[in-house]
Amino acid sequence: MFKPIRVALTAALLTIASYGIAAEMREGHPDTYVVKKGDTLWDIAGRFLKRPWLWPEIWQANPQIKNPHLIYPGDVISLAYLNRVAQVTPGPRQEAPIDAIPLAQVEPFLKNMRVVDDIESLPYVVALEEDRLRGTQGQLAYVKGLEGAQPGQRFAIVRPTVRYTRIDRDDCCDLFLKDDLDYRGRRLLFEGALWTNAFVAENGRELLGYELAQLTTGTVSRVPGDGVDTTTLVMDASAGREVRVGDRLVPVEAQPYDLRFFPHPPKQSLEYGRARVLAIADMLTSGGPRDVVALSVGSRDGVDNGTVFSTWRVGSTEPDRVKIGFERDGTLVGRGDKVRLPDEYAGHVMVFRTFENVSYALVMSGVRPTRVGYELKHPDAPY
């Protein structure tokens, strides 16, 4: 009974039937492999398959794996297909199971970053204990907008950092913009931040969302009443960032993320120019393996955790110097005297947290840095 369910799910995720299972194996692979501490599903599949996002093919060859998310160091998995059968055995269950991607690399972003559609309606810190400019562990924050909260309730204190927007253009490609925000969550120009602009545009923007960085958490200790207008919050230990007036509050998420998913291609095709790299975490314009990137697509585009994209530098449009002559100014050349160059492959990214219009992904591999503005395509796209 398990096998039909397993095969059906695998086919639904990756349309395995469209690939030749044996053809996906790298040459010289062993019949079995012993899972080691530090491995990930991506690493194992990338070592033995030509496409690391086709992990379910290894699962298909190992019916003893009832739950592919519960693979442990010491497990012996079969890499023999078709008419070659290998003896497989479970390993000890003394260590944590293997995740799809390296948790340690993305955990700070899983906990601390989220995207919302509106910040004006969120409760906010209006003052701090002893009229301080900054607050930290064990100190009090006074909050407006928490009507109805009760003593003992828990909230996360977050800071609006950037606003992502998009201009829908039919003649070419969408344009994307990231605006840094001030302490009130309003646009702030000419100030550095952890993220960087993708494109500059002015009017007709569609809001993709506001990015919120979590600073700390806190517990309600006193509610408004008896002449007091604010809710009092006792702050927990912060993650190296102090709280200030204007920071917002959101409910604490019991389980903000789940890394137990399959690497898989996008579930639906995306129109060229609609899916781009919006920003690189902690970098100015580019990132490499294990860097976190923000993408301009989310759940409304069929993107979910585990979705794998390839990233591409958009091909340049250059004047045909041989035709027009090297002495002419290229900026004054008409479209008929220019040539469109092909997009250039950069690497692969895997989504690990998804919101409606924006998602976060980890750069898994690449031949060159992935940069802001790069196009997202199917992981197997040839060009």
Image: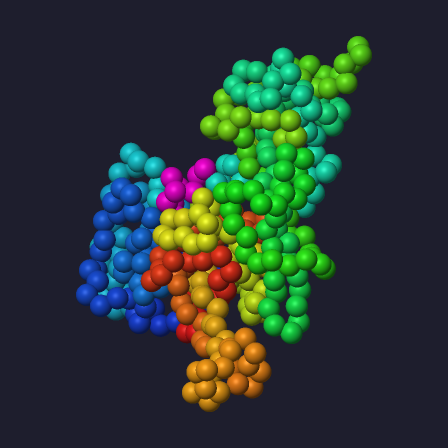
Q: Residue at x 68, y 29 (%)?
A: 124
Q: Which residue is drawn at 44% across and 62% down?
A: 311
Residue 315 visible somewhere in the drawing: yes
Residue 373: image location, x then y, percent: 51, 60
Relative placement, left or right, of 185 versus 78 is: right
Relative placement, left or right, of 192 versus 169 is: left
Q: Tally the marks.
A: 0
- The quarter of the picture where residue 128 lies is top right
State which region is magenta.
Answer: 99-108
**For residue 202, above or below residue 245:** below
Q: Does 367 lie within the magenta span?
A: no
Q: Is the magenta stretch mostly helix, strand or loop?
A: helix
Residue 61 visible somewhere in the drawing: no
Q: Which of 160 and 106 is in front in this view?
A: 160
Quarter occupied by the C terminus: bottom left
Quarter occupied by the N terminus: bottom left
Residue 360: image location, x then y, percent: 51, 49
Q: Which residue is drawn at 39% across and 63% down?
A: 346
**For residue 105, above or below residue 48:** above
- The quarter of the picture where residue 116 lies is top right
Residue 306: image location, x then y, percent: 47, 53
**For residue 295, above or below residue 95:** below
